[in-house]
Image: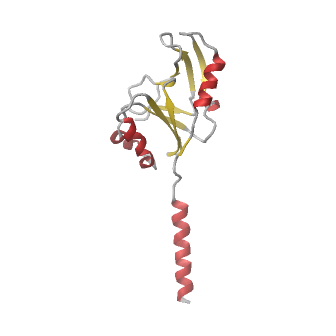
Amino acid sequence: MLRILRFGYVLILSVVLISCDSREPVSIDYTAELEEVALEANLQPGEILTAIDLTRVFTKNEWDSIIVIKPYAKYTHFKKLDLENNSDVRFILREMQFVDHHYYLLFVQENEITAYAKMNNFHRLAVTDNGFFPVISRSNPTVSLIRLKDDPDFYQFQKVSNQKIK
């Protein structure tokens, strides 16, 4: 009888531990999608296309917000966001402390990072706010696309509103 109780206890404990385990964020490549948007726009250097809905671009995973990890970002600032699994992307912040030739997007669903995307600077998601980690909300996913006049090989996706996590 004691063995049955122990087995039951171990089984219940195992189920509880497994159900509490959070998902580890997955790496997703959105380079082709952003390139397609830029090519379809067929912009001349210096020309601007408004109202691109990012919910139609970033479709490979669920998200309710996107956090932009800008160059030279620091983990000490990032952990203040208090996401459930922010330590799972610590390697990104370690890398970004020292680089400026790319950036990352973190896809967040219900306060948990579900995916991340390493983005090159050819399709830069520009943010003009002063926040450490600007956020694009699913409720306001509209950006403008700009083909840079000085360097027409580069496109810039510019946030329409200045929304950020504090």
* Applied colour scheme: secondary structure
* Percent of width and height locating residue 66: 52, 35
The percent position of residue 139, horizontal first and vertical second, equals: 57, 32
Q: Is residue 92 left or right of residue 32?
A: left
**Residue 130 can be seen in this image:** yes
Residue 159 at least partly seen? no
Quadrant including the N terminus: bottom right
Identify the residue shown where x is 39% and y is 30%. Answer: 71
Q: Nearer the viewer, residue 39 or 156?
A: 39
In the image, residue 72 above or below residue 27 = above
Residue 5: image quadrant is bottom right
> Residue 160 location, x and y as percent?
52, 21
Q: Is residue 14 above or below residue 78?
A: below
Q: Nearer the viewer, residue 28 or 146?
A: 28
Task: In the displayed orientation, state which residue is furthest to the left.
Answer: 76
Name the quarter where the C terminus is drawn. top left
Which quarter of the picture shows residue 18? bottom right
- Measuring 63% from the left and 19% from the top, which residue is drawn there? 39
Q: Residue at x 50, y 23 (%)?
A: 161
Left or right, residue 133 beside residue 125:
left
Q: Position of residue 52 (x, y in %)?
A: 61, 23
Vertical comparison of 133 with 90: above or below = above
